Every structure is written in C-alpha cells, then in structure tokens.
Image (cartoon, rainbow, N blue to C red):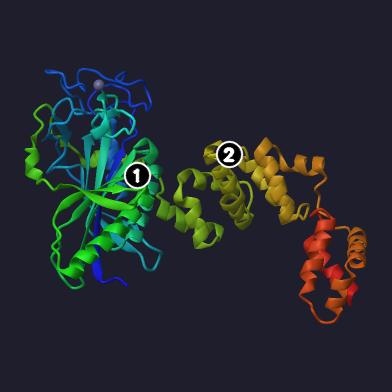
Amino acid sequence: MVKYEIVIGLEVHVQLKTESKLFCGCSTEFGAEPNTHTCPVCEGLPGALPVLNKKAVEFAVRTALALNCRVNEYAKFDRKNYFYPDLPKNYQTSQKDMPFAEHGFLEIGEPGKSRNIGITRAHVEEDAGKLIHAGVSGQIGEAEESLVDLNRTGIPLLEIVSEPDIRSSAEAYEYLGSLKSILQYIGISDCDMEKGSLRCDANISLRPFGQKELNPKVEIKNLNSFKNVKDALDYETARQTACLDTGEKTYQETRLFTAEKGVTTQMRSKEEANDYRYFPEPDLVVNHITPAYIEEVKKGLVELPSARKKRFVERYKIPEYDAGVLTAAKATADYFERCTALHNGYKALSNLVMGELAGFLKATGKEITESPVTPENLVKLVKLMENNTVSSKIAKVVFEEMYKKGTDPEKIVKEKGLVQITDTNMINSIVEKVIANNIKSVEQYKAGKTEVLGFLVGQVMKESQGKANPGMANKVLKEKLQ
Ligand SMILES: [Zn+2]
C-alpha cells in the first residue's frame, strides 16, 4: 500500500564517446597504464589553456535533439570550484546557467498509457581523476596510502538531469533503460556502467498525496547498476515513509547506498550550490549554436528506439513485446533486420533471436555483433523448420551446433542425420513399436483416459530421437488407437 506520493528525479552522467578528452588531445582509451594519458592541460598546470572538443559539442546537441530538448543558442562553460586530490585544477569545468540543452522529455510506459518524464537540462563537463586507496579494504579510512590516476581527468561527460516527474522505483528503472537505449542508438556513449561510462545519482522525497510543495530531497549516491537504483529507491521509500508516519522531519542530505546490505546511510548534509563559487570560465569563449548547425546534426540522427519499435510492429507484424525486446539495443535490432532482409519468416526469426540466440550469447558472454551464428545461417535454419526438414525440437539441437561451430545448418542436419521423419511408413512402424511396449497406457487410453496420448506421443519422439514429425506422430497414434 503506497501511503505517500513518491517524487524521484535522476541525474545521469554519461561519458561521451570521443577519441580525445574535452579540452586537450589526450586519448580517452579505457584501461591504459595510470597517468599515461595526460598533458599540461588535464594535469592543470599553470598557463595551459583548454581547447573545446568539437565532437563533444556535436554529441551534446545530438542528445538534445533525441531527448526533445531545446538547444540553447548560446552555451558557456563555468568553473565549479572545490578541492579534492583527483582534481588538479581545483575546479571542474562544467556548465551552470547556460547549458547546451534544456526543457526536454523522455517517454516511458506502454503505448496508450505512456508518460513524459521531463528533462530539465543536459550539460557538458569534464570528469575528475581516479583515486586508488591502497590497502586491504580499498576504503579510504583504512588505506596506507592513496594514489591518483589522471587518465580520466578531463574526459567529457554529459550530465542529464530529469525533472522530479518519476513516481516509483519501477518508473526510474524504466527511464534509465530507455535513456541508455537512446544514448546507445545515437552513438554518443557506450553507457557501460561497469566501466563507469554511465553513472547515476537519484533524488527522492515523499509527500502526502495532494500536497503541492516538495519535502526536502535525499540524494543517493554509489548506485552501480539499474537494479541498485531501484533497490536504493525502495529502501528510501520505506525509510522516509516511517519518518513521515512518526512525524519525524526529513532534511536535505546525501546518502550512500551499500548494495550488499541494501541500505542507505548518511554521507553528509547537503551543501548549497553556491558553496562551489561558480564563475564563468574565462579561458573559453561562449559557444554560438546556430540553426544551420542544429540542422546539420539533425541529418546525422538515426531512427530512435521508440520509432523503430513501432515500425517493427507495423512492418513485421510481430507482437509489441517482441518489438520492444528486439529494439532495446541497436545491435540486436540491426541483426534482426539483416535477417528480415533475407527472409519473411518474421515471427520465427524473432523467436530465435530473442530465445536461443540471446540465451547462448548471455551464457558465453558474447555481444550480438560477435555472434557465431550469422543472419544468413539463422535464416537457413528457419527455412529448414518451415519446410519440415527439422522439427522445432531438433532445431534447438541444430542451433546449438551452429553456435558452437559457426557452421551452416544444412550441413549440420546432413552430417548428423537430423532430418525430420515425415515418411508415413517409418512413423507407422515406430508407432506400432511404442504401442507394443506401452500396453498399460494404451489400455488406459482406450478406457477413456485420453490425456495419456501426450505421453505416447512423447514416446514416439523419444524412439525416433526427436526426429518424428510431432503432428504426424499424433495423427498416426490416434488412428491406431481407435
Ligand atoms: Zn591532456
């Protein structure tokens, strides 16, 4: 029972997929030796001047368009001042009052009952370095020494801030999934949480239904997966419900989520924005984003997931559910359309891509772009099923071979003798054998217990090593049992 209205806003940081850093030519490659991708600019040496990465601007504008935002005609950078050992300049170059994008929205929910979640703004900023706390626990308090790696310093980030329009942890989960899908489609980020290229902070407060003003929000940090976001929000909902129930005041604070325990704990009471003494970055000019430039970026936009999903339903006549699964990741949708370009057995193709293929990819830790089963071979398998060469049961066996060896299904079927038995005489003789070996079941059937037919069909399939055509087995059995 939900007693209070849940108000959630999300702040998502994504790493932009540029070759070089935001203000210098250093590489953004992940996993390099510490401090090998640095230069005077990202090391914050006095006198080094930043030059803005053009690609980062293009990516910001592309995202703005995909998220239905207004692209601001003028965008500028500001210095956000604070001290921390991973920030050599003692300020982060970010955007305060003139970001690249504002006032957008993202649609969530099923068609017919969808909702728009407002996007407050999207701004570009640089990442900080990485601190490594050397010691058994890796925690700062127990470290013997701390090391700093500046490879990440200056890597371009896009911060996407939602309006407090999200009303449940499930909606937050959906918003994140949808946002990730869009950002991957438009190619601005890998959105890989494990590599830190997507990070999320969540703001949550509760209020009695009907109350207009918001209660103080709690910001939750250290959310390393979408599931963590959901779990942390559920925990906070319960905690804040208890506070409101007992009349205890909630206040603005930052809390840390510990996934192992599933709890949030207080980190600090929230500083105000003006603690950062933002001021305009004097080393960078104000960016003028012209309508012509926006048009240029628009031309490079691909079909977005929601539009593609709709098209899949209309074009391929597959269920809404299938279309949603197939279009969630661009690579999967691309793979499916490479198949549909070759053959029109759309539903059978969809079943194999969502079922067998997805299962094997997951089990072997492969991406669909690395699939040993090519679209050409998948189509061949569907055709073998359609012309009754293999049963759907045998198709699974064939698929496994295709996946393991990367070979042609026709070859596998021939080599392994997996061709479906559709010869009436052969099926007749198998059925006779099964009847002779299962007298008890046959008697039960004749006495009116017709549900044993399934068992007998199963025996025929077993006897034929799965190769008998199940429809024919069924028919012949029924005839013989009359
Ligand atoms: Zn650099």
Residue at the (6%, 43%) spot, across then down? 274
Q: Position of residue 356 (x, y in %)?
A: 61, 49
Q: Is 386 on the left-hand or right-hand side of 63?
A: right
For this rendering, which residue is in front, 148 or 297? 148
| Residue where numbered disc 2 is placed | 371
For this rendering, which residue is in front, 145 or 129? 145
Q: Which of the two discs, 2 and 1, sits closer to the camera?
A: 1
Residue at the (35%, 42%) spot, across then down? 299
Task: Decide if residue 12 is in sight here.
Answer: yes
Name the amino acid type tagged 2. Ser
| Residue where numbered disc 1 is placed | 224
- Image quadrant in which the N terminus is located: bottom left
Q: Quadrant of residue 33?
A: top left
Name the amino acid type tagged 1. Asn
Residue at the (24%, 43%) spot, across then down? 159
Label 2: element kind: loop
Q: Quadrant of residue 335?
A: top right
Q: Is 458 on the left-hand or right-hand side of 262?
A: right
Q: Position of residue 14 (x, y in %)?
A: 31, 40
Compared to residue 148, the image places residue 425 above or below, namely: below
